[in-house]
Image: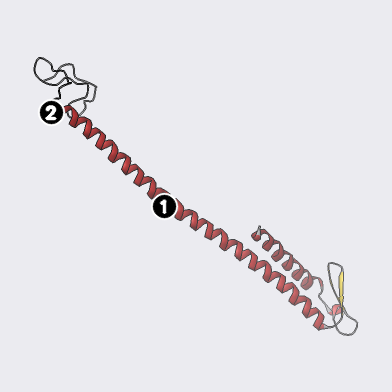
Amino acid sequence: MILILGLILLIAAVIVGLAGVFGNTGPGHDLGVGGDFSIFGYHVTGSTGSLFLSGIIVGAVALLGLTLVMMGARRSVRRSAQARRELGTSRREAAAVDRERDDLIKQRDDARAGAGAGAPTADVPRAETGAPVTDAPRGRGHWFGHRAAHR
C-alpha cells in the first residue's frame, strides 16, 4: 500500500513538473510585470518567488513519493529475506526430524532382529530341531518374503 501511494505521488509530481516546463515556453509566458504561469489551466500570477515556491512544493511531493517507494521496496526485501531464513530453518528442522525417524526405524529393526536371534524364552515353542519358532525373520529380511524351510 505504501509503495502504491508513493508511486502515485511521484508520478503526479513528475507530470505536474513536466506539464509546467513544456506548457509554458516562449517569451509570452514571462513572470515579469503582469505575467502569469499556467499548469493544466490553473494560472499562477505573481512574482518569480511564488513560482519558485510552487516548484519547491512539487519537488517536496516528488521527494515524499520517492521516499514512500523506497520504504515499500525495503520492506518487501526485508520480508523476503525473513521468509528465506525461515525456509532454511524449516528445512533444517525437517532434516533433523527425518534423521530421528530413520534412527528410530533402525532401532526398531535391530530390536526385531535381536529378538529373533536372542536366547530362547520359556513361552516360545520349539521345533523338533531345537530352534525357536517365530514369525520374525532371522537376520536380514529376504527380498521375496519368508523362506519355505529353515537351513
Alpha carbon separation for disc pair 1 and 2 = 46 Å
| Outermost residue, top side | 128
Q: Which mark is residue 119?
A: 2
Residue 11 lies, with reference to residue 120, above or below; the image says: below
Choose mark 1 or mark 2, whichever is in front: 2
In the picture, the quarter occupied by the C terminus is top left
Front position in the image: 103 or 35: 103
In the picture, the quarter occupied by the N terminus is bottom right
Front position in the image: 85 or 61: 85
Residue 103 lies, with reference to residue 32, above or below; the image says: above
CB atoms at circles 1 and 2 under 8 Å apart? Answer: no
| Outermost residue, front side | 122
Residue beneath the point at 49% across and 58% down: 81
Query: Residue 23 placed where, x, y %?
Result: 81, 70
First of labels 1, 2 by sequence position: 1
Front position in the image: 6 or 133: 133
Element at label 2: loop
